Every structure is written in structure tokens, then in C-alpha cells.
Image (cartoon, grey):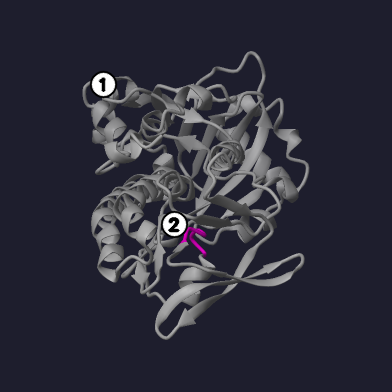
Amino acid sequence: MMLGYLLARAGVDVVVLEKHADFLRDFRGDTIHPSTLEVIHELGLLDEFLKLPHQKLERLAGNISGETFFLADFTHLPTHCKYIVFMPQWDFLNFLERQGRQLPSFRLRMETEVVDLAREGTRVSGVRAKTPAGEIEVRAGLVVAADGRHSTVRSLAGLEVEVIGAPIDVLWMRLSRQPSDPPQTLGRMDRGRIFVTLDRGDYWQCAYVIPKGGFEKVRSEGLPAFRSAIVAIAKDFRDRIGELRDWDDIKLLSVAVDRLKQWHVPGLLCIGDAAHAMSPVGGIGINLAVQDAVAAANILAADLRRGTPADVRLAEVQSRREWPARVTQRFQVLVQNRIIGRVLRAVRPFKPPRIVRAIGRCTFLQRIPARLIGMGVRPEHIRATERSTM
């Protein structure tokens, strides 16, 4: 959606295909980081965007074995918005749709699911898609796969995936938010358990981290045992844990960390999770995908106005964005293996690592993870020439 809007804004004819009838997918990535907010500011849309219902987070905290540590302070970032915004992803997507529909060269087709690639020789020349009215073919000078970690398009293109792996899965759920609850978004860790709560206004979006492939074991132990496990680490939820009435209230996110060795073939480019699936650590994935979109628009818009971009230009997008993806994944894997994995394996009270204690004691050190989480590696910006066209 972001890339479609940026390209249409630059005068490129764009068709965005979405297989569902709406964007209402619960427990999607709902964190919009300062890097993304800066892009929205550069587009001149920030004031309107912030009129949408949202919550702000200026400092990130964690509770480890009963002790609370501040781990990231976003208030010092060199951005217009020195905080993370929590907003349902469907609101963000609907906002981009409204902006896109104001542009004559932007089209969005809902309930349009890509089922195959169209080719001219070795070049991808479009897609075949299934709609309620039957199958259609959409021809394009460039097909961009932005269909996530289980990308259909990258599979159809035969692109090779390098699996890095993740030792965790995540169970998502929602619990009501009471007026007496503290406002702080918080991650709680103790021996064998990790529970994260995200402030969504009138409810908490909650994540319970489990070992990879461990969901069937959790289910076999029964829902009462699962509720008890949550209360053991988050006693303040005792009064509402019964809101988890059955397993339909709990959604499994199978965590994957992988990346393509090559993001493109002639006529096709992958971005976002389709190119590099991210762990939920830091909530960075959606923001890294937006950065990919900005870089792709900056590099490809002029070529797309003239027709089909050369393969070397697609390689330029990968060259620009692969290093940030690799560095971010390395950071996520480090956190997964050194902290999260150790907590889940622990049978005794977990002692916070020295680096966590040091960051918690020193406000200056809190700026380092804030920079990595809030702005990412090599943040992208809207080119001034593109800004001036509006």
C-alpha cells in the first residue's frame, strides 16, 4: 500500500491487489515507529494521520523476575515524532487507501488473489488472479511481491529462501483494559514465561511467547493451565483471565526469520517480509517493510514512468535494503537466543543480563536500542524532487 501510494504520487500507474474483502486482520503488526512517522511527515500527511485513534509510547520497559527496567528512550531521536504509535494496522492501511484514491493513477482491487505469474519468455509480465467474478490477468511493467512471510508470489517465482530460524512462537490474545491499569506497555519475563502487553486503548493486546512448535503441548495441558500460567507472571490480570473462554480466543503466530538470497527476477521484485521475514522482537517488521517501499519508490519511479525498469535497478533496491535487513535480523536473533531462549529454558529465577542492567541504570544507553528500534538501520526518506511534485 505504501509503495503503491508513493509510485502513484510520482505519476506511475499502479494496481494494488488484496486477496481479502477488507483489511480487518487481528493481531497484525500494530506498531508504527518514528522512522515510518517521519516518512508520513515528509509526505505532508502527519497531522491528518495522528487524528486517527492511537496510543503513544515514549519509553520501552521490561519486567524481569519482578524488577522493572527501562530499555529504550525514544524522546531523544532526531525525528518529528519521538515515540512509537500503536494503531490497528487496518486503520493504517485504510488511511493509505484514502490517500491513494485521491490520485488518478492509483487503483486498489479487493478480493483479488494472485494465483500465478504471467510471463513473456523469462520475464514476469504480470499476474493471474482469482476474483469473485472469475479469473483475471493484470499486465505490468513490474510486479512487486509484498505478500508477507508466506509469500505466494516469491514461491511462484522460484526464489531461493535462506532459513535463519527462530526458537519461538507467539500466542496472541486480547484482555480488557481497566481504568485502574497502569498505562505502560510492558514485557514481563520470568523462568519459563514471557508475556507482553500492548496498550490498545480499551483492551490489552497480549502476547505469550512459547518454544517453537510448542502450541500443541500448551493445548494438551488445557485452557485452565494456560490461564494459570499467564496469571503466574501477570497477577494483575487475575480478575479478567476468564475472558479467554476457549482456544478460538487465542491466535498462533508461527515465527519465521528468513530472507531471500535474491529479491528479484526480470520483471519482479520482493520487498518486506516477502524478501526478509522478521521476528516480532522489537516490532520492527512493518517499519522495515515501509523503508523498503520508500527505497523502491526512490530508485524505480523514474524508470517506471518510462516503462519497465532494468534488472540492474531491481538489484539496486536489494543492494540498498539487504544490509539493513541483515543487521536487524542479526539483532533479533541475538535477542532470541541470548535472552528469550534462556528465559524459556530457565527453571530457576532468571537473572537479568548485565547489559540489560546497564541499560536500565543509564538513560544515555537507552538511546542506543531506541535508535535501532525506532529508526532502524539506514532509514529512508522521501526524495525532495518527489515531495515537490505535490
Helix, strand or loop: magenta stretch: loop
Mark 1: secondary structure: helix
Which kind of residue does numbered mark 2 sit on?
Answer: Asp
Q: Which region is colored magenta?
A: 145-150
Question: Is residue 147 on the magenta stretch?
Answer: yes
Front residue of 122 and 104: 104
* The C terminus: image quadrant: top left
Q: In the image, residue 251 lies at what x, y percent? A: 64, 50
Q: In this picture, is 267 found above or below 320?
A: below
Q: In the image, residue 35 lies at what x, y percent? A: 35, 35
Q: Is residue 347 visible?
A: no
Mark 2: secondary structure: helix
Figure quadrant of residue 275: bottom left
Figure quadrant of residue 27: top right
Figure quadrant of residue 136: bottom right
Q: In this picture, is 17 found above or below 235?
A: below
Label 2 crowd (10 A; few <14 / some 14-19 / many >=20): many
Name the mark on residue 361.
1
The residue under the point 73% across, 39% down is 244
Label 1 crowd (10 A; few <14 / some 14-19 / many >=20): some
- Given this view, does label 2 or label 1 mark the residue nearer the observer? 2
Q: Are marks 2 and 1 in contact (CB under 8 Å)?
A: no
Q: In the image, residue 103 lies at what x, y percent? A: 53, 42
State left or right for residue 137 relative to residue 348: right
Front residue of 186 and 15: 15
Q: In the image, residue 33 lies at what x, y percent? A: 41, 34
Question: Is residue 38 on the magenta stretch?
Answer: no
The residue under the point 50% across, 55% down is 14
Front residue of 383 and 87: 383
Name the mark on residue 273.
2
